[in-house]
Image (tube, rainbow, N blue to C red):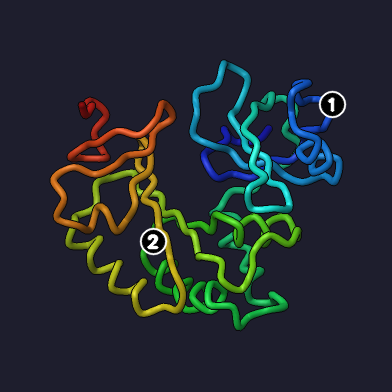
């Protein structure tokens, strides 16, 4: 039995024949090669999970749904981080990989569950080439409790010391907010939820809805 899928988890088990008739040919071809799908933030009926299929080209992204019962394997961003496969990557000089090697000990010391997402996380988890030398380093940090904005600013300073572009999302119980946005002086920040984006003053509170 797999844990409940969360956004950015990679899932195996979706097959070409499971796709609706209108799905693009490239998406069927990708699934035929046993490519995993990534969990996305969108409503889903009971027993289903919203997922996205990645193609070989950057513009090839297809949103669909998968039955939870079809999941044969689940790899979370946190599992990617724990596995540490970037240490043996063929191109350790890439900025994103250098940044990951530099930041991993710092994140481990935080005592919070952190993970690697985006194209690099996809490649490290699946072994399928997806990243390139200019790829951003996309990270997620599970934050069940509110983090002070001063703490967020201090963490931004740590990220700024690492090479390349780094996008870190704070995963709250109600959605995700960009670390840099929470570190700003903005009175309201964008919270990505299962039902779409919301502007909120506190991403750790569920009752706030912006106009």
How many circles with numbers are drawn on the protein? 2
Sequence-earlier tag: 2 or 1: 1
- Residue that mark 2 sits on: 111
Q: Quadrant of residue 106?
A: bottom left
Categorize mark 2 by other alpha carbons within 10 Å: few (<14), some (14-19), many (20+).
Answer: few
Please tell me whether residue 207 is drawn above or below residue 158 in the rendered image: above
Q: Is residue 19 visible?
A: yes
Please tell me whether residue 158 is drawn above or below residue 130 in the rendered image: below
Q: Position of residue 95 (x, y in %)?
A: 53, 77
Q: Nearer the viewer, residue 11 or 119?
A: 119
Please tell me whether residue 150 is drawn above or below residue 101 in the rendered image: above
Q: Nearer the viewer, residue 118 or 147?
A: 118
Q: Position of residue 121 (x, y in %)?
A: 60, 58
Q: Quadrant of the C terminus?
A: top left
Q: Nearer the viewer, residue 110 or 91?
A: 91
Q: Is residue 74 visible?
A: no
Please tell me whether residue 179 is drawn above or below residue 162 in the rendered image: above
**Closer to the observer: label 2 or label 1?**
1
- Residue that mark 1 sits on: 17
In percent of the image, x 58 and y 29: which residue is there? Answer: 50
In percent of the image, x 29 and y 42: which residue is there? Answer: 190
Q: Quadrant of the N terminus?
A: top right
Q: Position of residue 154 (x, y in %)?
A: 24, 69
Task: Tell me the tag on residue 110.
Answer: none
In percent of the image, x 72 and y 78: which residue is there? Answer: 90
Query: Tag 1, which secondary structure?
Result: helix
Q: Nearer the viewer, residue 100 or 28?
A: 28
Categorize mark 1 by other alpha carbons within 10 Å: few (<14), some (14-19), many (20+).
Answer: few
Q: Quadrant of residue 34?
A: top right
> Distance of mark 2 from mark 1, alpha carbons?
42 Å
């Amino acid at each position: 039995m797999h844990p409940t899928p969360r956004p950015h988890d990679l899932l195996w088990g979706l097959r070409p024949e499971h796709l609706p008739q209108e799905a693009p040919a490239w998406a069927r071809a990708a699934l035929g090669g046993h490519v995993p799908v990534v969990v996305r933030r969108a409503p889903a009926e009971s027993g289903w999970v919203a997922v996205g299929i990645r193609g070989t080209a950057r513009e090839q992204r297809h949103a669909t749904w998968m039955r939870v019962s079809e999941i044969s394997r689940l790899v979370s961003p946190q599992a990617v981080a724990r596995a540490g496969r970037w240490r043996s990557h063929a191109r350790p000089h890439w900025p994103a990989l250098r940044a990951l090697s530099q930041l991993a000990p710092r994140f481990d010391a935080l005592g919070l569950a952190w993970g690697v997402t985006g194209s690099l996380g996809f490649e490290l988890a699946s072994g399928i080439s997806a990243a390139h030398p200019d790829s951003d380093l996309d990270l997620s940090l599970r934050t069940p409790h509110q983090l002070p904005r001063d703490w967020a600013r201090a963490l931004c300073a740590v990220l700024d010391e690492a090479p390349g572009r780094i996008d870190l999302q704070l995963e709250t119980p109600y959605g995700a907010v960009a670390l840099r946005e929470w570190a700003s002086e903005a009175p309201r920040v964008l919270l990505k939820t299962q039902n779409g984006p919301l502007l909120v003053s506190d991403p750790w509170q569920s009752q706030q809805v912006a106009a």
